[in-house]
Image: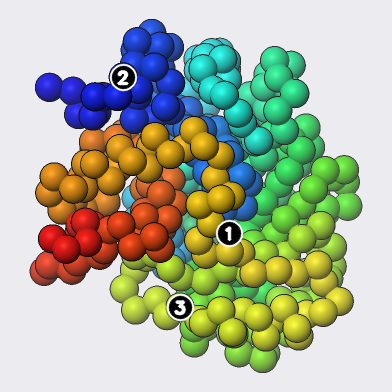
Amino acid sequence: MSPFPRGNGESLLTGIPTWEYNKTMNSVKHVFGPVPSRRLGISLGVDIIPFKTCSLDCIYCECSKTTNLSLRRESFVSVDAILGEIKKSIAGAQYIEYITFSGSGEPTLNKDIGAIIKGIKAMSDIPVAVLTNGTLLYLDDVQEALLAADLILPSLDAASPGAFAEINRPHKDLELKNVIEGLVGFSARYKGQLWVEVFIVGGVNDNDQELELLHRTLKRINPTRVQLNSLDRPPAYENVLPVDTTVLQSIVEKWNDLPVEVIKRVRERGEIASFSRNLESSILNTVQRRPLTIEDLVTLTGMKRVELFKYIDILEKEKKIITRIVGNHIFYAPIGQ
Ligand code: SF4
C-alpha cells in the first residue's frame, strides 16, 4: 500500500495531481518541496550532501548529530542528475520563491556546487539561495562557487574559540579565525544579499562578552541582514538551553547599528501560499489515525525533518495537534487523543 494518503487525487508532497506526481516526481531524490520556509517563503530545496556530512557538529542541529565530520570537498552526485531533478520539479510546481541549497549537511562540501548553481541560473530566473555554515568560505574555490547565487545565508554563532568549540563542535582542523576571515573576504566580493544567522544558546553565547565579540565581528562582515535564532526544536545534543524571545529582542536593541532582526518562530497560516494546505491536511490526516514521531513522518512522507517541522509548527499553533512525550520519544497526536 502506498504510504501516501491520496484520496483527494493529489500527492502529499506537492498538491499536484497523483498521476502527475507519479510521472514527474517519483524519481526525485535530491530535490524536495516546494515547502514553506520561515526565512525564504516558498522554497524548492536542493540537497547535494549525504545525510549528516558536515564540517560542524552543532549542539542545536535539528537534523541529528553529525556522523561524517569532514572538510573534504567531493563530487557526491552527478551534476546533470541534480539539474534534471530541479528542471522536473520546477515544471511541476505552481510557485517557487527560491531554489535553496539546504538539507542535512553542509552544501559547500559538494565541490560541484558552483556548476550546479550556474546550471540553475541557465535554466531559470528563480533566485538561488544557499544555506551554509560558512566555514569553508576561506577557500577561494568556495567563494567563486557561491558568487553566482542571489542570496547566501551563512551562520556564525561564536566569535571566540571557546564558544565556537562548545556550540559548533567543529572539525579539528577548522580554525575560527579562518572562518571569520572567509566571511569578511567573501562579503567584500559578493554583490548579492548576505544574511547571517546567529543562533543564541543560553549560558554559552548570550553573555555580554560573547555578544560584544560577535557584534564587532558582524560589523566587519557587514552583511545585508543579521537574523537571530534560538532553540525551538529537539536538538542533536541534550541540555541545549533556549533563550526567550525577549532576550533576542534585547540583542536587537543592543546591536542597533546592525540590520538585525529576530527570525519568526512560527509562520502565520496567511503567510503560506495556498498549495501547501494539501500537505498540511495530509500530515493532519496521517497523525489523526495514530500518534507519530517525526521519524514516522519522515518515513511516510519522504520529507526532511526540518521541512516537516515547519508544517508541525503551524498545526500546533492552530491547536490541531499536540506534542506527547512517551519514554524518550516525542509523538504528535491530534487534540483530544
Ligand atoms: S546546524 Fe547546520 S552546520 Fe550545524 S551541524 Fe547541523 S547541518 Fe551542520
Q: Nearer the viewer, mark 1 or mark 2?
A: 2
Question: What residue does disc 3 label?
Answer: 242
Please indicate whether residue 188 sits to the left or right of residue 300 in the image.
right
Q: Which mark is residue 9?
A: 2
Q: Residue furthest bottom?
A: 208
Badge 3: how crowded within 10 Å, few (<14), some, or many (20+)?
A: some
Name which of mark 1 and mark 2 comes first in the sequence: 2
Q: Would you say the residues marked 3 and 2 are in contact, meaning their CB atoms lie under 8 Å apart? A: no
Q: Nearer the viewer, residue 167 or 75?
A: 167
Badge 1: how crowded within 10 Å, few (<14), some, or many (20+)?
A: some
Q: Between marks 1 and 3, how big is the CA–CA gap?
A: 26 Å
Q: Residue 165, position in %: x, y?
A: 51, 72
Please indicate whether residue 285 sits to the left or right of residue 234 in the image.
left
Question: What residue does disc 1 label?
Answer: 174
Q: Is residue 110 above or below residue 165?
A: above
Which quadrant is home to the C terminus? bottom left
Secondary structure category for the residue under label 3: loop
Q: Residue at x 31, y 73 (%)?
A: 238
Q: Between marks 3 and 2, how big is the CA–CA gap?
A: 41 Å
Q: Is residue 183 above or below residue 5?
A: below
Secondary structure category for the residue under label 2: loop
